[in-house]
Image (spheres, rainbow, N blue to C red):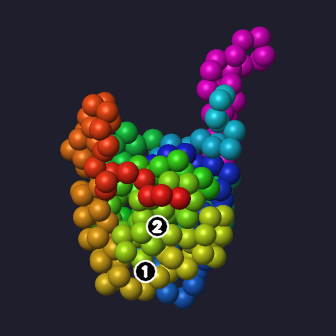
Amino acid sequence: CSEGGWGAAAMDAVEIAVRVVRSGSAFGAAAAGASHVLGAVGVAADGAHASGRCSLGEGNGGSDVERVLETAAAIVARLRARIAELGLEQAVHLMDFVPRPQGLMQLCDVCVLATYQETFGLVLIEAMSLGVAVIGSNAGGVPEIITDGESGLLFETRNADSLVAALRRLHDDPALRARLAQAGRRVAAERFSLARHYDALEAILRGEAPPEDTQSPAP
């Protein structure tokens, strides 16, 4: 579950869902509409090509925005066809744009941020603050948010097997999932609350060093 766009990796996400559902674990019940549902919250967009192409163009047969939307529609159509082909309509849900996805996010057992290179990862903090266990790719700013095995799980970026293993681990160990969710909520409150953010920003504007626990760890 993540807020954002469906990029070229979306088909990989469906394949991962299929592998987890058919792995022989209780996730298999999801295909019959049971308790475990894999889903995503967000708006369809071709993340690999949308960047820098969201300004209107003239004299070129249409705007860049229109072409991006057409590409997004094609990706969604392919995804829906693949989901139907595998009989997973009740297990994989593609949502339209949701302006406040937190309401749906808190219904999830796990929130996954599977982007290849995330500058920060606000969606993880949102999920953590709601008491949802999180899994993130071990790249970019995500390791600054998740301490692997303590406040969430990290998986090897661009490695579907690693992501499947993390998902299966949290599925098969409810106690671990609950512990990570509780720890994640505590981390979100202590390190990433609005009050901490404003205190650190005010300190910087005053020319002072921000509180130690709001600074990024040394490389």
Magenta span contains residue 27: no
What is the C-alpha distance between the residues marked 2 and 1?
Answer: 12 Å
Q: Is residue 20 left or right of residue 48?
A: left
Q: Which residues are magenta?
A: 54-77
Q: N-terminal of the two: label 2 or label 1?
A: 2
Residue 47 at what x, y percent from top left? 63, 43
Q: Which amino acid is tagged 1?
A: His
Secondary structure of residue under mark 2: strand
The residue tagged 1 is 171
Question: Who's the residue at 72% across and 19% down the image?
Answer: 62
- The answer to whether 181 is drawn above or below residue 79 in the figure is below
Check disc 1 and report its element: helix, strand or loop.
Answer: helix
Q: Nearer the viewer, residue 204 or 21?
A: 204
Q: Which residue is mark 2?
A: 135
Q: Residue at x 50, y 54 (%)?
A: 141
Question: x, y percentage for residue 163?
Answer: 57, 72
